[in-house]
Image: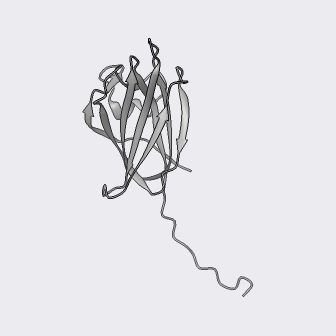
Amino acid sequence: MSWVYPVAASNIQEWYDVPSGYGHAAALAVGDSEYIYAPAGIYRNSILLDMGQDCGLCEIRARRGTGLFDIASLVVHFHDAGFSQSEQWLIDLQSYPNWSDFTFTPSFPWRYVDLEGHSIDVLVGVSMLRGASIVNIPRRLLTGVGL
């Protein structure tokens, strides 16, 4: 399995990178010291990430900050290359104040993913997002195999 990381970020609304200026897409391919986050209580946030190719399995490392309520979730919208199919995944971060890994496999090959952090009083952070590359392997005809 070959991992694919975001190659571009667009439509960035209330998502910030750490360290500042590192780059949103770049921060998701490095480690837990580089990450993106949506501030506490901001419900109108989103970021669209382009993986550069079709993917299958998706892995995300995310966490919530700490605050008065500690209520947070990450909404992940998957889209195919033509934006004709979409699927949503909701990650409840209420029990995850530390970086934790989450895995999901959409029902179709996806290329774009839109993230939204929903929280009350705490930030939502993502330090890694990657997809398993879907490689088109040509099928070879086998002849003379027990026929």
Q: Position of residue 30 (x, y in %)?
A: 46, 30
Q: Relative to residue 12, is residue 34 drawn left or right?
A: right
* Residue extending farthest right: 146
Q: Is residue 2 above or below residue 65?
A: below
Q: Quadrant of the C terminus?
A: bottom right
Which residue is rendered at x = 45% and y = 16% of the image? 69
Which residue is rendered at x = 55% and y = 73% of the image? 139
* Residue extending farthest bottom: 147
Q: Is residue 136 above or below residue 88?
A: below
**Number of marks:** 0
Q: Is residue 73 above or below residue 87?
A: above
Which one is in front, 87 or 27? Answer: 87
Which residue is rendered at x = 41% and y = 40% of the image? 76
Q: Report which quarter residue 73 is drawn in.
A: top left
Q: Report which quarter residue 120 is drawn in.
A: top left
Q: Relative to residue 133, is residue 19 drawn left or right?
A: left
Q: Position of residue 113 (x, y in %)?
A: 37, 44
Which one is in front, 13 or 93? Answer: 93
Q: Position of residue 141 (x, y in %)?
A: 59, 79
Which residue is rendered at x = 57% and y = 75% of the image? 140
Q: Relative to residue 22, is residue 68 drawn left or right?
A: right
Q: Is residue 123 above or below residue 140?
A: above
Q: Relative to residue 50, is residue 105 drawn left or right?
A: right
Q: Position of residue 132 (x, y in %)?
A: 51, 49
